[in-house]
Amino acid sequence: MQPPPAAASAPTTPRVLVSLATYNEVDNIRPLAEAIRKTVPFVDILVVDDNSPDGTGRVADDMAKEHPWVTVLHRTGKLGLGTAIIAAMKHAVEQKYDYYINLDADFSHPPRFIPALLDGVTGTGGKPPVDVMIGSRYIPGGGVEGEFGLRRKFMSTGVNMYARLLLGLQSRDNSGSFRCYRVSKLALIDFSWVRSRGYSFQEEILFWCRRVGCTFGETPILFENRRAGQSKLHPDEAVKALQIMAGLGFDRALGRLPDRR
């Protein structure tokens, strides 16, 4: 008598970490975290707060007491968006998550697009999985809702053009931070390589992901105006981004980059 066939095992739910880097987002942090969990109920949320004077960190601590899926990392001051995301990426690697998602903490990146990011890295829908899935404003179906001034549009367009030219990136939206990464690939990056501390991190991390062999995809998103608080983006950030990309581009051309693992 032949033994009965083994029952097919149910697919396991991936471990996913979503990070929110905060500085003075007291009115956004709780409703945003709740909206994320309503959209993808199985994710964990890491709040990286830079000692916000408006009390964002205290609200995040209250959330962590209420919900086991919230963790808070307090930092001593406003240390830069890039370093906040690096801290979250390291946490994802150390805690052995499968995927890591970052989005802005002001509702400009609507949580309803998170499932499309996850579909890209898991290969759901019949397409081959990728290592980095970018929520893109600049492919068909993507765009910007509400006000997006000429100066900000010029900054974004210029930075993306230089990222493709100097860093060899093929993706259209290299300056946005709404992305999903395969954590096993992030583990291959030595974060001491990263030169950016502010918003230029968005382009630079794609460069290092490409250098360790990541594959990329883009899915359309609509970028929306923040719901509360004030933007921290300053024109100086665009200048810094161009300077860092120029340095990386020259070092790439001259073969002066650190060796990959």
Image (spheres, grey):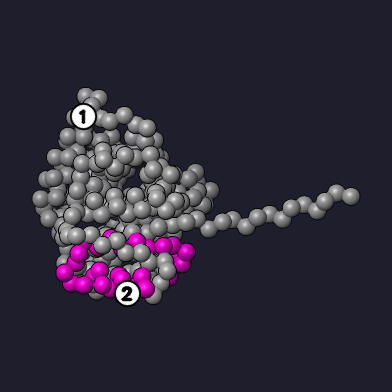
Q: Please give the name of the residue rendered at 25% of the width and 30% of the height, measured from the top-left corner.
A: 257
Determine whether label 2 and label 1 are within 8 Å by CB: no
Whether residue 64 is visible here, answered yes or no, is yes
* Marker disc for residue 251: 1
Would you say 241 lies left or right of 204 here? left
Q: Is residue 91 above or below residue 20?
A: above
State the image quarter where residue 141 is shown: bottom left
Label 1 Cα neighbours within 10 Å, binned few <14 / some 14-19 / many ≥20: few
Nearer the camera: disc 2 or disc 1? 2
Type of amino acid under label 1: Asp
- Most extreme residue toward the top is 254
State the image quarter where residue 178 is shown: bottom left
Q: Position of residue 15 (x, y in %)?
A: 47, 56
Where disc 1 sits, the SS reads helix
- Residue annotated with mark 2: 62
Magenta span covers which residues? 38-65
Q: Please give the name of the residue rendered at 20% of the width and 41% of the height, measured from the top-left corner.
A: 195
* Residue nearest the viewer, comparing 59 with 213: 59
Q: Is residue 30 above or below residue 231?
A: below
State the CA–CA distance, disc 2 to disc 1.
46 Å
Q: Please give the name of the residue rendered at 31% of the width and 71% of the height, measured from the top-left corner.
A: 61
